[in-house]
Image (cartoon, rainbow, N blue to C red):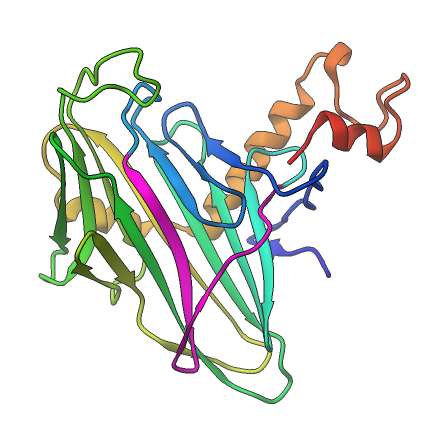
Amino acid sequence: MDSKIIGGIRLPGQVPYLNSREDFFVGNGIVGAGGSGDGTWNFLVGPDYTCPKYLKKEQIKLAIDGTEQSVTMDVHRARNTGIFYGVKTIGDLEVYLIDYAVGGYSWIARQVIVDNKSATADHTVGIKAYVNPETGDERSAAIIKDSSVRESAVALKLGTLLNCVMKFCPNWKSRYCLICFNEPTATVTHSADTYILETATQTIAPGGSRSVELCHYHADGEHADSSYIDLIRQGNIAANIESCIVQWQRWFDQVDDGYSLSPDFPNELHSKCWLDIIEPA
């Protein structure tokens, strides 16, 4: 499989597992998320890691030619970064799910790229996110409308009587997370404890591609409003991932020589096998 070009940069190759599929965590010190390594999240915190977790579960699914399909895959770290992604082939379609958080920002995102590898066949594709928040006292969830009064996002709120995720301190401020797709035609519905965020269906021509992003915007305070939806929609997702890759690669380049993971490190750690052990998925 050829490595993926996003924006003006190549997505680094995947670091293999040491044995079986592993849990993963992606974050930037302000916000964080992760899951069981199959592309499903069960953890989301922010702003700050001293935060109760928001999610029981978040899963990405596709509607392909009218049929809904799960997008489960082996998620690996992108080499020399803190980005995690998986790749799955579904018929003619090659699907990338990329989880990342750009340093210095209070949002974390999941980019879905669907490439139609067929030379002759069109395919219709829609992207869905099934969000199951944690429930109970001091927790609430609400659908948020955008400036066009379209129900477009879900906001999860945490109160101050909760404990942080590791239970060692109280949640010392009210926080919320607003979740929505970056496309203006996306909608959200609610069924029992599940919020279903959904993009419009689009036709991908032979050799064509579609890219959307599910953003999780975190902030302090009591309320979320449509201005945050506007900010998410205005973002450049290709430039964001490119920036995140560059940030991580610069960080790795600055590692002291005594701890370097570079393949030309001048001691016994010359082989890719050793590097994989040091830098596991």
Q: Report the magenta residues as a range.
A: 54-77
Is there any visible trace of residue 233 in the rendered image?
no
Q: Residue at x 25, y 67 (%)?
A: 185
> Is 50 left or right of 33, judged from the image as shown?
left
Residue 238 position within the rendered picture, expressed as x and y whole percent measured from the top left: 49, 52
Q: Which corner quadrant holds the C terminus?
A: top right
Q: Residue at x 66, y 18 (%)?
A: 254
Q: Is residue 273 magenta?
A: no
- Secondary structure mostly seen in magenta is strand
Residue 68 position within the rendered picture, expressed as x and y whole percent measured from the top left: 40, 73
Q: Is residue 60 magenta?
A: yes
Residue 251 position within the rendered picture, expressed as x and y whole percent measured from the top left: 60, 24
Q: Residue at x 35, y 22 (%)?
A: 49
> Is 210 left or right of 130, judged from the image as shown?
right
Taking 153 as reference, is 125 above or below it? below
Residue 45 position within the rendered picture, expressed as x and y whole percent measured from the top left: 33, 30
Taking 116 as reference, is 70 above or below it? above
73 vs 114, nearest the viewer: 73
Q: Residue at x 56, y 48 (%)?
A: 85
Taking 206 as reference, is 17 above or below it? above
> Is 170 left or right of 257, judged from the image as shown?
left
168 vs 180, nearest the viewer: 168
Q: Based on the displayed image, in which of its 4 quarters is residue 192 positioned?
A: bottom left
Is there any visible trace of residue 257 in the rendered image?
yes
Residue at the far bottom in the pictured view: 120
170 vs 232, nearest the viewer: 170
